[in-house]
Image (tube, helix red, strand yellow):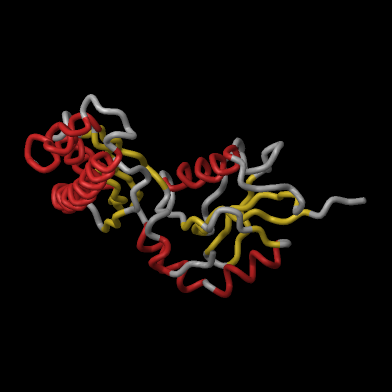
């Protein structure tokens, strides 16, 4: 019995974009990436078996690797991971139905890429600073010190709540400070949801190629000022994952 296949859609690009010969898609073995063109748009796709499970870490990595690599040389609109159509006609229909929105979005992302700034509080440093500044928290810490969890359960819960609240307030302040420090070098920004209870900063920025160096330097300066309190990472360049939703692209 012949295996049914479909086309996994990675992203939308201008029609003159050509996948590199070594580009690999999702699946095991990896699918060969092709560009299906319609007018002045194209979709990056690869063939997949319809009964093949998607969502393995290797598949997500392949999806991101292809889109991030494309974003370094051309504007690209990521299509939601796992989008599969039954054949080339489905791709043509997608490109035709949303042509104007896709084209407008590609124009906006021309020569722009995403960077994500992620920082996490050093737990001991943060708690030490909190206890030095907050008498109530310091008193609770004294009450639980040297006592078993059972004996000090109520105090531990209250202290944990105070720490969580302090992290949340400080996170909001640090996100604002991060945006204020680097936003002049970015075309747009969008705060992202925390990925960990100690997240300090998590913001995506859309950065123009002509301001990339200044943006990176500003992030490095911000991180240096807070090196004792948090550990920061600059992730990118990336495809504009956090900005395509503004155009209500097909998912």
Q: How many numbered callouts?
A: 0
Residue sitting at x 31%, y 51%: 204
**Is 139 on the left-hand or right-hand side of 45?**
left
Q: Residue furthest top?
A: 146
Which image quadrant for residue 227? top left
Residue sitting at x 40%, y 53%: 240
Q: Residue furthest front?
A: 151
x%, y% of residue 214? Answer: 19, 42
Query: Is 6 placed above or below 127 here?
Result: below
Residue 66: tell me if it is visible. yes
Residue sitting at x 59%, y 37%: 58
x%, y% of residue 5? Answer: 77, 54
x%, y% of residue 180? Answer: 14, 52
Query: Is 97 placed above or below 198 here?
Result: below
Quadrant of the frame with the C terminus: bottom right
x%, y% of residue 223? Answer: 19, 35
**Is 44 on the left-hand or right-hand side of 154?**
right
Which image quadrant for residue 72? top left
Query: Is 102 placed above or below 233 here?
Result: below
Residue sitting at x 70%, y 67%: 89
**Is 75 on the left-hand or right-hand side of 118?**
right
Residue 185: tell me if it is visible. no
């Amino acid at each position: 019995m012949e295996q049914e296949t479909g086309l996994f859609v990675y992203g939308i690009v201008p029609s003159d974009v050509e996948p590199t010969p070594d580009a690999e898609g999702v699946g095991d073995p990896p699918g060969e990436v092709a560009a299906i063109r319609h007018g002045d748009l194209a979709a990056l796709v690869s063939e997949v078996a319809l009964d093949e499970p998607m969502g393995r870490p290797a598949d997500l990595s392949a999806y991101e690797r292809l889109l991030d690599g494309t974003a370094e040389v051309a504007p690209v609109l990521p299509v939601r991971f796992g989008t599969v159509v039954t054949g080339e006609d489905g791709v043509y229909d997608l490109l035709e139905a949303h042509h104007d929105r896709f084209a407008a979005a590609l124009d906006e992302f021309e020569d722009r890429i995403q960077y994500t700034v992620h920082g996490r509080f050093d737990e001991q440093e943060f708690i030490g600073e909190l206890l030095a500044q907050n008498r109530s928290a310091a008193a609770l810490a004294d009450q639980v010190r040297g006592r078993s969890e059972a004996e000090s359960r109520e105090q531990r819960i209250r202290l944990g709540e105070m720490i969580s609240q302090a992290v949340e307030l400080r996170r909001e302040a640090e996100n604002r400070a991060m945006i204020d420090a680097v936003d002049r070098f970015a075309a747009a920004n969008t705060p992202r949801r925390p990925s960990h209870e100690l997240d300090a900063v998590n913001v995506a920025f859309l950065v123009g190629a002509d301001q990339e160096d200044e943006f990176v330097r500003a992030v490095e300066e911000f991180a240096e000022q807070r090196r004792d309190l948090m550990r920061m990472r600059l992730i990118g360049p990336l495809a504009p994952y956090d900005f395509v939703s503004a155009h209500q692209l097909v998912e």
